[in-house]
């Protein structure tokens, strides 16, 4: 994070879902005071969703208002007037480039691995010179590049060219003590013993080769759920009753059941003191 700020380079974070990649951008925004601009990627995302589009509803109202008043504008002038900045809807990328006042914004391009090759190529161009052209208005250039954070869950490989533009970091799941500290910070209603027991169980579950191992968010949710139910200390019955809070796929739940709830309860007892 320090080097990304110091060198003015985008930060590319890759890792399993739920390890806290998105939280890095949120933390940077709180730290620097810059506005967090989030672009959530998905299959089929295009320039209209990421950069800009025209407000067609307001343009249509402008046309109708012109028709209803005396001395209506000439067609050419009317058409030109439809493409003013007042009708431009700025999406996250353009807002990040156009920012002029206050702290530098933090641009979060989330789950870039969900987008397609064409959008990746477009991002590569944006990250190279931080400019974008709106044909009707001209080129917008960033006076100061935003703090950019790209995340990937590695559902597919992102092209090397995009990674080369960035500083790369693989985000691991936190170790036991750090996860306990995170739960205590984010869920202060959960006492130390229960936080340690839940973190211990999650540590074992992640080692079972699940399709979607629980992330830190699931650890926090599980601890909160158990605290709300008053199920402390964590025993075999409590683990079985609340497993769906942390393990969200039936096949993964079956693998946990095959391992045995008794073994999870033993792990909780061993690390929960």
Image (cartoon, rainbow, N blue to C red):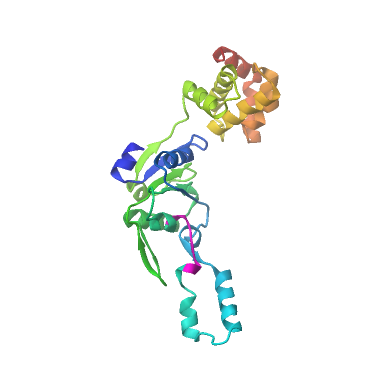
Q: Please tell me which residue is depicted at 47% across the width and 62% down the height of the picture.
A: 52
Name the residue furthest front. Answer: 70
Task: Report the span colored magenta.
Answer: 86-93
User: Which quadrant of the structure image shows residue 183?
Assistant: top right
Compare residues 12 and 65 and report the one nearer the observer.
65
Q: Is residue 259 left or right of residue 3?
A: right
In the displayed structure, 75 sits above or below 217; it is below
Can you say which quadrant of the picture contains the N terminus?
top left
| Quadrant containing the C terminus in the rendered view | top right
| 59 over 140 or under it: above or below | below
Q: Position of residue 241 (x, y in %)?
A: 70, 25
Residue most toward the left?
7
166 relative to 76, above or below: above
Image quadrant in which you'd find residue 249: top right
Q: Would residue 215 be visible to someone looking at this image?
A: no
Res 227 seen here: yes
Query: Can you give x and y, in whole percent of width and height, for residue 3 in the image?
Result: 31, 39
Q: Quadrant of residue 224?
A: top right
Q: Nearer the viewer, residue 271 or 147?
A: 147
Q: Position of residue 90 (x, y in %)?
A: 47, 60
In this view, the residue in front, 11 or 105, is: 105
Q: Count numbered badges in the picture.
A: 0
Residue 197: image x %, image y %?
A: 58, 19
Q: Is residue 179 in the magenta section? A: no
């Amino acid at each position: 994070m320090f080097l990304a700020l110091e060198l003015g380079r985008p930060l590319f974070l890759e890792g399993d879902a739920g390890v806290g990649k998105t939280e890095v951008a949120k933390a940077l925004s709180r730290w620097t005071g810059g506005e967090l601009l989030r672009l959530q990627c998905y299959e089929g995302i295009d320039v209209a969703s990421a950069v800009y589009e025209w407000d067609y509803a307001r343009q249509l109202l402008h046309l109708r208002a012109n028709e209803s008043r005396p001395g209506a504008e000439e067609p050419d002038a009317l058409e030109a007037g439809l493409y003013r900045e007042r009708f431009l809807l700025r999406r996250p990328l353009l807002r990040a480039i156009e920012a002029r006042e206050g702290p530098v914004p933090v641009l979060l391009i989330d789950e870039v691995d969900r987008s397609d090759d064409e959008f990746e190529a477009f991002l590569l161009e944006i990250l190279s010179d931080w400019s974008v052209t709106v044909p009707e208005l001209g080129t917008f250039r960033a006076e100061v590049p935003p703090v950019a954070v790209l995340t990937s869950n590695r559902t597919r490989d992102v092209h090397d060219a995009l990674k080369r533009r960035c500083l790369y970091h693989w985000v691991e799941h936190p170790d036991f003590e750090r996860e306990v500290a995170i739960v205590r910070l984010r869920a202060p209603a959960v006492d130390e013993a229960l936080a340690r027991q839940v973190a211990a169980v999650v540590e074992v579950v992640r080692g079972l080769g699940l399709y979607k191992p629980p992330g830190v968010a699931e650890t926090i949710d599980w601890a909160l759920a158990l605290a709300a139910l008053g199920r402390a200390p964590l025993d075999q019955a409590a683990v079985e009753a609340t497993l769906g809070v942390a393990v969200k796929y039936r096949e993964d739940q079956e693998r946990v059941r095959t391992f045995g709830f008794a073994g999870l309860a033993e792990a909780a007892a061993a690390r929960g003191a």
